[in-house]
Image (cartoon, rainbow, N blue to C red):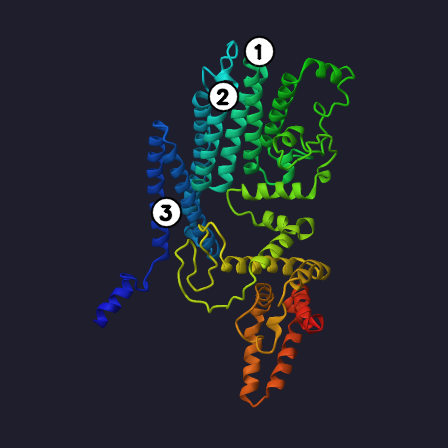
Amino acid sequence: MEGARDNSEASGGCGGIVRSSDPAKFISTIGKSADQLLKHLHVLTQEALDHADLTVLTGTIGATALLKNCLRFYIQILSDVKSPSIEPLRTGYKKYNEMCEALAERLLDLHCRLLSLYIIQDADCLDWENDKPFFESERGSYIIQMWWLYMQGTKEDLWNTVPPKMAQRVFAGMLNESLTILTVRYSQCLPSEARTELLLVDISNLLFCVAQLLPSICDTVQDLTGSGQITKSKMLRDVHVKCQQLYCCFLLRGTSLDTLHKIFKKGTDNLNLLNPKGAAPTPWIIFALPNIFKDGNISLNRLTEVEECSTLGMELMVLLAQPQANWALLLKVLCSKKFKVLRILLNEFMERSNQELRKTPLKAEDCGNLLCSGDGTCKNMDTTSSTLTPNHYYELIISASQVLLHVGNEEELNEYFVEVVMQHSNWAKCFERRNVWNQIRPAWYEAILNIVFPILPVVEETVINALQTGATMYQAMSLIVACFSQFWDMLGKHTYTGIMWIVDLPSLGQ
């Protein structure tokens, strides 16, 4: 039995430890298998293109990107050890990268053809010379409705199957190309009097739809509003130009001749509609986001004149529309406007989480989610619930507090953190002699302790050694304070501020 086990472990079978592996053969096997998978993906791609099967095509792109990233991972490891057999993997990586880009172009081309040939074509809706109103003027055309549904569904598919940046590029291309067709169509058509109302309804619906889709391809509020130096993306600039042209068409065709005469008889030099200010939001986005720009004022000179809540609302729109978590943008949103979002979160969650929660010991269990470490430190929770549980509130308060503790200075901590905490009853209960050592802690206090925890093992070892040699409790406490005083440089100024605030709490509570 023991001999069989040794042989199994030596050969690496049945979960045994590989003792006689050959790195060169392993790398060669990876390269050959990557080439075979690449040939298989080429076959799948050809079949998908022949049958215009978008499901298979997007799945192929996702698989290609995954394999490309695996090769990149192996290349990075081998580069660190300076292995001479890395070239086959680099060649394979280059092929996968080229295939990903080529498939993205084919996917964009296929979507654009489907949009232009089928989705935005309807004989009845485009019969502009008809003397009868469309659907008795009770609705807009089917074209805009089907275009909206197709764009929404495609975005969901791209976000779930295609690499994030590639998904944004494909979606931006679809939006830009379809807008080109629709802008030319609605700008140049000559409807009868009965169909003029349909034209106006379609343009307004189109602008409302674009305003909801646009945050998905933006990185900043400036990109969304078209203010200032719009972004490095030519597509975004084109989208804003086309939407502004549609908005001008909507106003000029929908306004009475008397009103137009009064406006244009003074000239067009000072007309904000035709000459929008470079640093201000474009007029069309002000019209298309009435819940953000509630006063509808198009005479803004710059984006900073927009109300604080409106700016935060647009930042959240951009943040939530991203295909993957954008941590830099999240931190920017949380810290902007004097930590307004964090203050709202802390106030709301602390009011909803008044009950004390016992900190449970970590259990080494796998939650079943992707990348779970299984060591009890996973923070994954049930996000399918329609309501938040007390545990959700507890974790959210910890997260909000930790961001504020790491980013805020002493003045901001006193104004935005300490004041919020002290507004709630029994906030100092955890510092009573009977409770200070137990596991019942408010979430904000747990956040402060989490910052200090990395240095606790060293302090614990020193104090335990002292107790074993006969030190009293008061001597141990003095030793703890002495140890912390030696680690101030490691803790950083924000942790120091938080700890000193805890030290001053007895005087605050009196």
Label 1 Cα crowd, 10 Å radius (few <14 / some 14-19 / many 20+): some
Residue type at the position of mark 3: Gly
Camera-side residue of 112 and 503: 503
- Whole-percent x and y of residue 87? 43, 47
Gap in angstroms between the C-alphas marked 2 and 3: 54 Å
Amino acid type, callout 2: Ser
Tag in front: 2 or 3:
2
Category of crowding for the residue at label 3, using alpha-carbon neighbours closer than 10 angstroms: few (below 14), some (14–19), many (at least 20): many
Query: Is 156 placed above or below 129 here?
Result: below
Q: Which mark is residue 31?
A: 3
Where residue 67 sits: x, y (%)?
Answer: 40, 45
- Identify which residue is drawn at 60% across, 25% down: 242
Mark seen at residue 414? none
Question: In front here: 277 or 195?
Answer: 195
- Whole-percent x and y of residue 239? 59, 28
In this rendering, the label closer to the viewer, 3 or 1: 1
Q: Which mark is residue 193?
A: 1
To which residue does mark 2 refer? 141
